[in-house]
Amino acid sequence: MGLLDNNFAPLRSSMQMPLFSKSIRSTLVLALATALLPSCKKDQRGGVPLNVVDISINVNNPSYADLAVPGGWLYLSGGSLGLIVYRSSPTDFVALDRHCPYQPENMCRLVVDESQITARDTTCCHSAYLITNGTVTEGPAALSLQQYNTSFNGTTLRIYN
């Protein structure tokens, strides 16, 4: 046998594969589309209403002196019911909405308590959250606080969604 001999038999040729009828193919396509359709649906948001946020502040401005060192925080206008901005490291910040996500229609506004690390509302939503990341620490709430994106260039902090 030479190198150019084509005396081998393929394991399976396309002619030997069963052909699907149009109705079976249509049924498979319909089933696949139905299975994938819910994944294309936009997720329903729970909690606070989505608000456009795009704020830039110079952290060296004396008005923002509380953000000068890690562990510092302050309130800013913006979001649904205002923002809590927390400096977690020399280069990282966390920006959270003050609107309690438990029964948001009640418009409960959170305040940072004497611990300086927990935001809570004791009269309306009866829940508490860490200002370091917005997670629930107590109360009936199940959703974390709405968190906004932050970027920092060494001077200017941008808070946005």
Image (cartoon, rainbow, N blue to C red):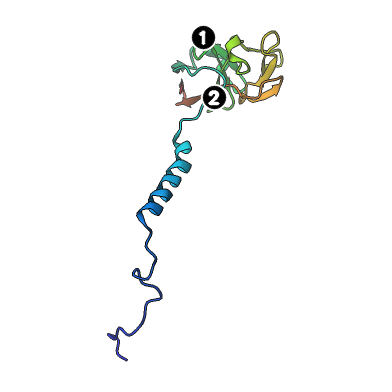
For disc 1, the marked residue is: 63
Q: Position of residue 40 (x, y in %)?
A: 44, 36
Q: Which residue is at 69% across, 8% downward?
A: 123
Q: Position of residue 97 (x, y in %)?
A: 55, 17
Q: Position of residue 9 (x, y in %)?
A: 36, 80
Residue that protrudes farthest toward the bottom in the picture: 1
Q: Quadrant of the N terminus?
A: bottom left
Q: Are marks 1 and 2 in contact (CB under 8 Å)?
A: no
Q: Which residue is at 52% across, 13% downward?
A: 80
Q: Earlier in the sequence, mark 1 or mark 2?
A: 1
In what element is the residue under mark 1? helix
Q: Position of residue 100 (x, y in %)?
A: 61, 16
Label 2: few (<14), some (14–19) or many (≥20) C-alpha neighbours in 10 Å: many
Of the residues shown, which amino acid type is indicated by label 1?
Answer: Ser
Q: Which residue is at 32% across, 85% downward?
A: 7
- Give 54 or 63, whichever is nearer the viewer: 54
Residue that protrudes farthest toward the left in the picture: 4
For disc 2, the marked residue is: 93
Q: Which residue is at 60% across, 10% downward?
A: 106
Residue 117 visible in this rendered orientation of the protein: no
